[in-house]
Amino acid sequence: MIKRLLIANRGEIACRVIRTARRLGLLTIAVYSEADAHALHVALADEAWPIGPAPARDSYLKIDAVIEAARRSAADAIHPGYGFLSENAGFADACAAAGIMFIGPPPNAIRAMGSKSASKDLMARAGVPLVPGYHGADQDPAVLAKAAEAIGYPVLIKASAGGGGKGMRVVEAAADLDEALSAARREAEASFGDPLLLIEKYMLRPRHIEMQVFADRHGNCIHLFERDCSIQRRYQKVVEEAPAPGMTQQRRAAIGAAAVAAARAVDYVGAGTVEFIAPGDGGADDFYFMEMNTRLQVEHPVTEAITGFDLVEWQIRVADGETLPLAQDQVVARGHAIEARLYAEDPARDFLPQPGRLDHVAFPADAAGVRVDAGVRSGDAVPREYDPMIAKLIAWGATRAEAIARLSRALSDTEIAGVRTNRGFLAAIVGHPAFAAAEIDTGFIARHRADLLPPPAPAGARILALATLARLLAERRASEAAAAGTADPHSPWAAVDGWRLNREAWQECLWRDGEATVAVRARFGRAGFVLSLPGGVGVGVAADGALAPDGTLLASLDGVRSTARVVRRGDIVTVFDRGAEHLLTLIDPLAAAAGEAAAGKLTAPMPGRISAVRVSPGERVARGHALIVVEAMKMEHTITAPAAGVVGAVHYRVGDLVEEGAELLVLEIGEAA
């Protein structure tokens, strides 16, 4: 019987498992890398054991270290969460050898379905329809090129051993195949330790439909309905929902039967997901098997929301030998649920990861039908070594429209400062008319990119007024505190009302808003401040209020009272107001102006590690030539030549760590190439 449970993961899934296990009366044991010493999952667990340095390969992916922590902590069982070792058959074997229960499927099932190539062969023998493709073991580039030609471009390259968009590339033409294969193989090796690739026909406007399955050790296997995971960027899911919009009972029954058959074919036990690709207007028989994920999925909360089940609890109970609590005909779906994944990334810069410190974190509290799965708090860090997901927001409603409305409000009420996030991007997706109309497929983001990623708008008068008022109130509070500590706090020299002899008292605040510099003049009045704003008319805006230590601003602007949040770190100010957020930089007029970067100096777009250097000093390159590759959070970004030129100095080697903005190399622009 399980009494002491070790969670071999981090982030929101580790927190999720800890909370469920504690509700079941189990003692929880966390493991952590050096980067996660102060993480939330470490604070929540009853015990926490260090397992190594920050890189996942030296900690969360190191089987011996995890098993040793389990042995020393006397754990009865290990829950692997998702990612890392959750689909590693060798880890399941190691658990068994150590006499520790692995909360997941048997190793043979992981092996059978863990390889996309092997699983497709298995499904073909079972009669499940497959997408045309090459799933062979021969990875010779010539063989892969011949297979791609036979399939017909465009094709999709996929890592055989993994998912989550890692090791995936769409190739439009034969000329691009070699580079795509190299990049996909590196990502596959880094993420899963297996460079094996497969190639499939790339379908246009498909929907990504997956079935949640669950099986016990007593021969029972059921499905818990489908999820639509079609809204994706970089082949990674962003918004998921259950049930799938427009799904007919006939198609649901057909896909459900195929999913259960797939699980039974490998004697599956526990939670799993069978993923299919289906044309948006296809019938019941028009779907194709893609893969089976032999673990819990990131998007499992939407299934929990419509069924009322706790799938982590089911995992623990099934692993402990219990039977499934319900038969297939007893499983009923109620309402609709949608999940949005909140990432530390910059959508405007091709979704580049944004590791860094979270200065401020606030999620909606006690909102009807809303659940937040998070693994961070204010002050925590988003480490560069791991996936940049911060949290998941899940909304349930009696109808899809109600779920959309609740998720939209939840996103509006979410505040993250310190790193850029995709919160606004998610809000744009959920608020898009095409999403409301369920006109969704895997090309949704690309098709509506102009709507979802509009050019940044300048700060309006209200944002500038709030930022300036917060600054003035903070200065007033600091001056009052300083005056209170003097020998005579009532001295006129300790006054904080801006009084000046024989002249009007005013102060100018300079803000950098994107590329523009904006000035706001604040005059000190009898009842607060009078702000002269850009584009304003008349005598200005009467402003006053109160600023709390957490940045909550109770503002009065021309007598209209409202609440906003203004968070400042150094010179960076983030204003949260009415569901929107805006970043401003406070300019110190006495500081020296920063020098402009030289045109030929190419810099790192994000903190990361150099995974490839494609050029040498003196080499002539054409515009678009790949120069150097930066890897962060298991994703690669290739720096290419902005124009023809000659490579000058190359400042980094493969394996070096770089900070955002670091000069990577010099390209002498304009030289003949």
Image (spheres, rainbow, N blue to C red):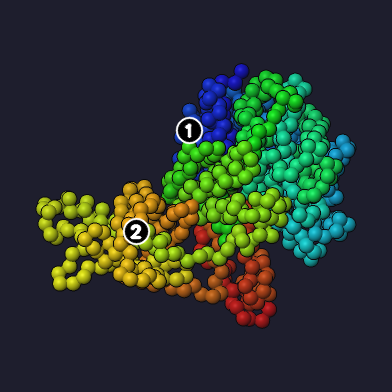
Query: What residue lies at 73% left-to-right and 41% top-to-bottom?
Result: 210
Q: Which residue is located at x 32 percent, y 51 percent?
A: 547
Label 2: how many residues lie within 10 Å, few (<14), some (14-19) or many (20+)?
some
When asked about the image quadrant of residue 459, the answer is: bottom left
- Residue drawn at (80%, 35%) of the image: 253
Left or right of 138: which side holds 419? left
**367 relative to 586 in the view: left or right:** right
Secondary structure beneath disc 2?
A: strand
Residue sitting at 79 percent across and 47 percent down?
A: 278
Instruction: Name the image quarter holding the N terminus.
Output: top right
Mark seen at residue 557: 2
Front position in the image: 334 or 580: 334
Q: Amino acid at mark 1?
A: Leu
In the rendered structure, are the residues bearing label 1 and label 2 in contact, judged by CB atoms less than 8 Å apart? no
Q: Position of residue 405 (x, y in %)?
A: 57, 46
Q: Is residue 517 above or below residue 304?
A: below
Position of 570 relative to 264 (above/below): below
Residue 297 image position (x, y, % from top left): 66, 38
Give the labeled residue for mark 1: 44
Q: Is residue 392 visible?
A: no
